[in-house]
Image (cartoon, rainbow, N blue to C red):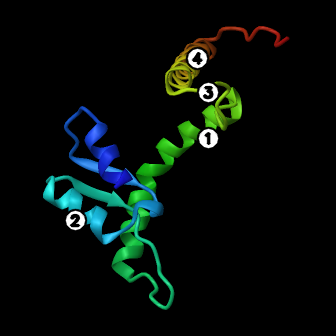
Amino acid sequence: MYFEAAINGVHIEANRVNADKGSASHANRQYLKTRKIKSAIMHRAYKNKPLSARQKLANRLISKKRYIIEQCFGTAKRLFRMGRASYFGTVKVNAQILMKSVCMNLKKAANKIFVDELSRGAVRPNAA
């Protein structure tokens, strides 16, 4: 129910959905199949039913892409305290996330510029 609402709430045409093991269910995979969207949902082992070799390989391939996305969330939580919302209400929380995301992108851009200048022989200023 929540999975379908999340997929329907996105207003772009997706050809693949990445999700963690919490979304691993036959119903979710079937829903993606009916919408002609490829599933990149990691497989989950259940009690007395270990993962097959094919499922382990699929999880390994999916995790190679997912770590890039997860790294972004980890950085946001670590540097900008995005582990918990500071406000109540969807509008305020969305605005907070948007502003912190802008700050994170500006920080990444500044780091790229700074690294480029260092490679050209610029002197690093003293950190305060």
In the picture, the disc for residue 103 is: 4
User: Relative to 57, does residue 3 appear above or below in the rendering?
Assistant: above
Please say if the residues under marks 2 and 1 sit with CB atoms less than 8 Å apart.
Answer: no
- In the rendering, at what x and y percent does residue 93 appear? 56, 25
Q: Residues within 10 Å of mark 4 (few under 14, many from 20)?
A: some
Which amino acid type is shown beneath numbered disc 1? Gly
Q: Residue at x 66, y 38 (%)?
A: 83
Mark earlier in primary sequence (3, 4)? 3
| Nearer the observer, 82 or 71 | 82
Q: Residue at x 20, y 52 (%)?
A: 37
Q: Residues within 10 Å of mark 2 (few under 14, many from 20)?
A: few
Q: Which residue is mark 1?
A: 74
User: Relative to 108, does residue 120 appear above or below in the rendering?
Assistant: above
Distance from label 1 to label 3 (Cα)?
22 Å
Mark earlier in primary sequence (1, 3)? 1
Q: Which residue is mark 3?
A: 88
Q: Residue at x 28, y 58 (%)?
A: 39
Tag in front: 4 or 2: 2
List the single residue furthest toward the right: 128
Tag in front: 1 or 3: 3
Mark earlier in primary sequence (3, 2)? 2
User: Relative to 28, does residue 118 appear above or below in the rendering?
Assistant: above
Distance from label 2 to label 1 (Cα)?
30 Å
Q: Which residue is mark 2?
A: 30
| Quadrant of the rendered image containing residue 120 | top right
Using residue 121 as the reference point, say whether residue 3 is left or right of it.
left
Tag in front: 3 or 2: 3
Which amino acid type is shown beneath numbered disc 4? Cys
Which amino acid type is shown beneath numbered disc 3? Phe
Please say if the residues under marks 1 and 3 sit with CB atoms less than 8 Å apart.
Answer: no
